[in-house]
Image: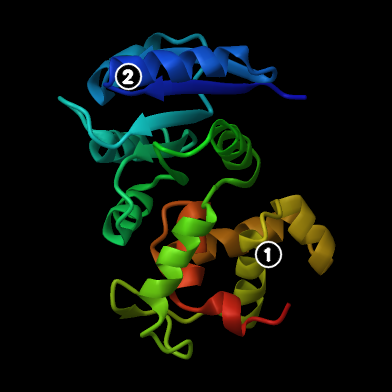
């Protein structure tokens, strides 16, 4: 099993130390850095022997908060996937973080197993959204017509193949698995994925999933 390289950025000392101690005990996890805010992490990152693959980031921090850190990493290291840790469960905060480039969103009162599962899923599938998050997105989509897709109120047109691939992405399939299912090459899947990102304005896989949910695509595509 591949080792997942992780970093933790959290300003609350007790929570930070407790979560770091947990992560260090998990087989298959390697905790590379533990930082008290985004500024410290950005200063620490260049000196690490390897970059973390998944970073757990508190939303509220001094000097550089979770939104600012997510946006900075999107510009400098878009390959690093971010899971937001927060006490806020409002839809607007969830959407804001995904739009900034986060790949997952966890409430701080979640259980240990959910944290571990989120890390593994973000590493393998590119996103993690629990049932609460998905239901919040669906509630926000109720007033939309599935016939009119949009991103920030700008109409978006997707081909049938793009819709098909988007559904499979939402089912957590990798490019290789999608290629095998559709009898096309992984390079072709990657091309469609890039087109989806460009058309929807999403920053990553997590953004594509949110686009699909908020535009009711999961309800209208064939299964």
In this view, 183 is above or below 58: below
Residue in the foreground of this view, choosing between 6 and 110: 110
In this rendering, would 97 be left or right of 211? Answer: left
Question: Tag 1's secondary structure?
Answer: helix
- In percent of width and height, residue 90 lies at 30, 57
How crowded pointer 1 is (Cα within 10 Å; few <14, some 14-19, many 20+) is rated as some
Quadrant showing the C terminus: bottom right
Quadrant containing the N terminus in the rendered view: top right
The one nearer the camera, 126 or 214, is 214
Residue at the disc numbered 1: 168
Q: Position of residue 180 (x, y in %)?
A: 83, 59
**Under tag 2, what secondary structure?**
helix
Q: Is residue 208 visible?
A: no
From the viewer's perspective, is 98 left or right of 3? left
Query: What residue lies at 69% left-to-right and 17% top-to-bottom?
Result: 27
Residues 180 and 64: in front is 64
Percent position (x, y) of residue 161? 66, 76
Crowd around label 2: few <14 · some 14–19 · many ≥20 (10 Å): some
Identify the residue at image location x=59%, y=32%.
116
Going from N to C along the chain, the mark reached first, 1 or 2, is 2
Can you say whether 76 is above or below 172 in the image?
Answer: above
Q: Are marks 1 and 2 in contact (CB under 8 Å)?
A: no
Coloring applied to the structure: rainbow
Instruction: Report the residue marked by disc 2.
Output: 41
């Amino acid at each position: 099993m591949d080792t997942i390289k992780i970093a933790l950025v959290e300003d609350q000392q007790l929570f930070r130390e407790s979560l770091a101690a947990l992560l260090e005990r998990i087989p298959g996890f390697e905790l590379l850095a533990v930082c008290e805010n985004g500024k410290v992490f950005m200063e620490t990152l260049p000196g690490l022997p390897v970059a973390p693959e998944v970073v757990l980031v508190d939303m509220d921090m001094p000097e550089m908060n979770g939104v600012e850190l997510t946006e900075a990493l999107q510009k400098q290291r878009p390959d690093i996937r971010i899971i937001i840790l927060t006490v806020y469960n409002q839809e607007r905060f969830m959407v804001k973080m995904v739009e900034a480039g986060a790949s997952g969103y966890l409430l701080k009162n979640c259980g240990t197993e959910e944290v571990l599962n989120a890390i593994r899923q973000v590493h393998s599938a590119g996103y993690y959204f629990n049932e609460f998050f998905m239901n919040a997105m669906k509630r926000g989509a109720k007033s939309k017509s599935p016939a009119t897709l949009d991103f920030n109120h700008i109409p978006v047109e997707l081909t049938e193949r793009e819709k098909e691939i988007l559904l499979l992405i939402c089912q957590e399939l990798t490019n290789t698995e999608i290629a095998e299912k559709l009898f096309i090459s992984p390079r072709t899947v990657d091309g469609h994925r890039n087109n989806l990102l460009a058309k929807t304005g999403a920053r990553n896989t997590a953004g594509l999933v949110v686009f699909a949910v908020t535009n009711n695509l999961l309800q209208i595509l064939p299964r």
